[in-house]
Amino acid sequence: MDEHLAPYFTAEKREALLFMLVGVAALAVSAWLFVSGDRYRGMMYPLAAIAAIQIVVGSTVSFRTDAQLLALKVQYQDAPAAFKADETQRMDTVVKNFRIYKWIEILLLTTGIVLTFALRRSDLWYAVGIGLIIQASLMLVLDLFAERRADEYLRFVMGVFIP
C-alpha cells in the first residue's frame, strides 16, 4: 500500500513546490516589467495574476500533504473500507476538477494566441497575450502531469482489497 501512497503524495508535493517556484519567478518578472517601462510591460498582468494562483495552490498542497498522507495511512490500516470509499470519492472530484482546469487553461492559451494575432499592433494587448500564453502553457503542462498521476492513484484506490 505504501508503495502507492508515498510516491503519489511525494510527486504532488514536488509539483506543488514547482508551482510555487514558477509563481515566484513570474512575480519577479512582473516586478521587473513594472519598473522597466518595457514595451512588453502588459505581460505583468497575466504573469502576476496566475502567479498568485500558483503560489496559493502550491502552498496549500505543499503544507497539507504530509498530514494528509499520515492520516490516509492510519485510515487504511484502521478502516480500509472507509479509506477506499472516502479516497475514491475525493479522487473522483480531483480528476473532475483537472478536466475543468484543462479547459480553463486551454481557453486562456487560446485567448493569448488570439490577442497576439488580432491585436498585435497594440503593445499592451500583444504583451498580455504573450503573458497568457506563457502562464497558461505552464499550468496546462503541470496539470496534465498531475492529472495523469491522479488517474493512476485513483485506479490504485479503486483496486484496494478489503478483507
Image (tube, rainbow, N blue to C red):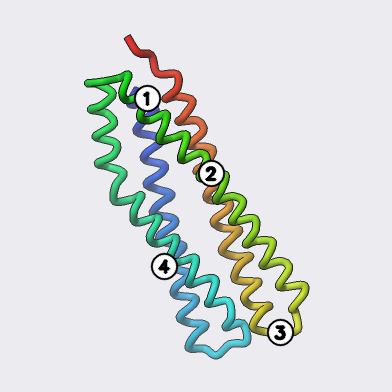
Residue appearing at x 49%, y 85% in the figure: 34
Q: Which disc, if any, is residue 122?
A: 3
Looking at the picture, does residue 11 appear above or below residue 47?
A: above
Provide residue 85's location: percent of width, then percent of height: 37, 25
Q: Which residue is the site of mark 1?
A: 85
Per the model, the C-alpha gap separating discs 4 and 1 is 37 Å
Element carrying mark 1: helix
The first of marks 4 and 3 along the sequence is 4
The first of marks 4 and 1 along the sequence is 4
Q: Which residue is the site of mark 2?
A: 145
- Identify the image quadrant of residue 132: bottom right
Tell us which disc is closer to us: 3 or 1: 1
Mark 1 vs 2: CB contact within 8 A: no
Number of marks in the rendered image: 4
**What amino acid does circle 4 point to?**
Val
Residue 76 as seen in the image, left or right of residue 101 = left
Element carrying mark 4: helix
Element carrying mark 3: loop
Q: Which disc, if any, is residue 32?
A: none
Q: Which residue is the site of mark 4?
A: 24
Per the model, the C-alpha gap separating discs 1 and 2 is 25 Å
